[in-house]
Amino acid sequence: MKHLAILGASGHGKVVAEIAELNGWKVSFFDDAHPNLTQIEHWSVEGTTQDLIDSVSVFQGCFIAIGNNAIRITKQVELSALGFHFPVLIHPAAIVSRLAKLEAGTVVMAGAVINPFAKIGQACIINTASTIDHDCVLADGVHVSPGANLAGAVEVGHCSWVGIGSKVKQCIKIGHHVVVGAGAAVVSDISDHQIVVGVPAKPKTSKC
Ligand SMILES: CC(=O)SCCNC(=O)CCNC(=O)[C@H](O)C(C)(C)COP(=O)(O)OP(=O)(O)OC[C@H]1O[C@@H](n2cnc3c(N)ncnc32)[C@H](O)[C@@H]1OP(=O)(O)O
């Protein structure tokens, strides 16, 4: 059986592990909290990042299950350079067009829908029941949270986080390192490093 190392023994890691198992992988967890952390649910945590690096030849695949977008993509780049292979993991109950393109280290969770000609970069999280419509382009390290909906031809920049239940109108451009707050409705472009909330979404101020 092919063997996947998952770095990040967290709630997100548990969901990733189940999807991996549904796709025929045997999983082993690693986390820098080891040896204080040796168990996550019924899975054992076998070592730290360094222990994982030392056992590169054992694993046919590796996956970074860390929610922080910048850390996730940074670790994937580092471990790729050391020879680790990053699969795409798709829950069997997700619907992914054969005409969509997904890059290494991206996970698609249950109930998500990805429509034709969407392009999803490396180390993205397409979370539970979110939808990515036709021609969307997501850069590396993007997280689309549960229940968020991207209409057609939306662009999302590097390491941006689209919050739970938010909606993004067609053809909108969301910059790099943006946070779209939970429940927001994005109807105009958002520049880099903004945090936006509300309906319609506006930059977050201390008073919002
Ligand atoms: C499987 C999973 O769990 S995946 C995880 C999914 N989670 C998400 O998508 C969460 C997305 N994150 C959010 O929406 C966050 O609230 C953020 C990033 C927008 C803001 O976070 P913080 O900066 O910590 O804001 P904080 O909680 O301190 O709230 C500051 C103010 O903004 C308001 N606020 C926070 N989030 C929102 C929002 N989404 N919409 C409207 N107002 C908001 C708060 O009510 C508060 O208002 P107040 O000052 O009048 O009391």
Image: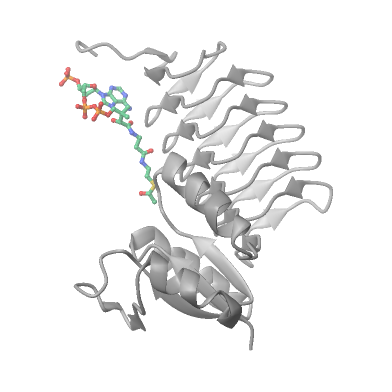
Q: Looking at the picture, tell me which residue is in the foreground, 47 or 50.
A: 50
Residue 155's spot in the image, x, y percent? Answer: 65, 26
Viewer-closest of 60 and 118: 60
The reply, left or right, for residue 118 in relation to residue 58 is right
Q: Is residue 154 left or right of residue 3?
A: right
- Residue at 60% x, 64% y is 91
Number of numbered callouts drawn: 0
Frontmost residue, 95 versus 24:
24
User: Which corner quadrant holds the C terminus?
Assistant: top left
| Residue 205 vertical position relative to residue 103 in the rendered view, above or below | above
Residue 57 image offset from top left, x and y in percent: 60, 79
Looking at the image, residue 190 lies above or below residue 111? above
User: Which residue is at a point 59% across and 55% down the rendered structure image?
Assistant: 108
* Residue closer to the observer: 114 or 79: 79
State the quadrant of the N terminus: bottom right
Q: Quadrant of residue 182?
A: top left
Q: Is residue 4 above or below residue 161?
A: below
Residue beneath the point at 52% across and 28% down: 167
Q: Position of residue 180 (x, y in %)?
A: 43, 26
The residue under the point 63% across, 62% down is: 86
Left or right of 116 in this view: 194 = left
Residue 205 in the figure: left or right of residue 143: left
Where on the image, by quarter, is ligand 1?
Answer: top left
The outermost residue toward the bottom is: 1
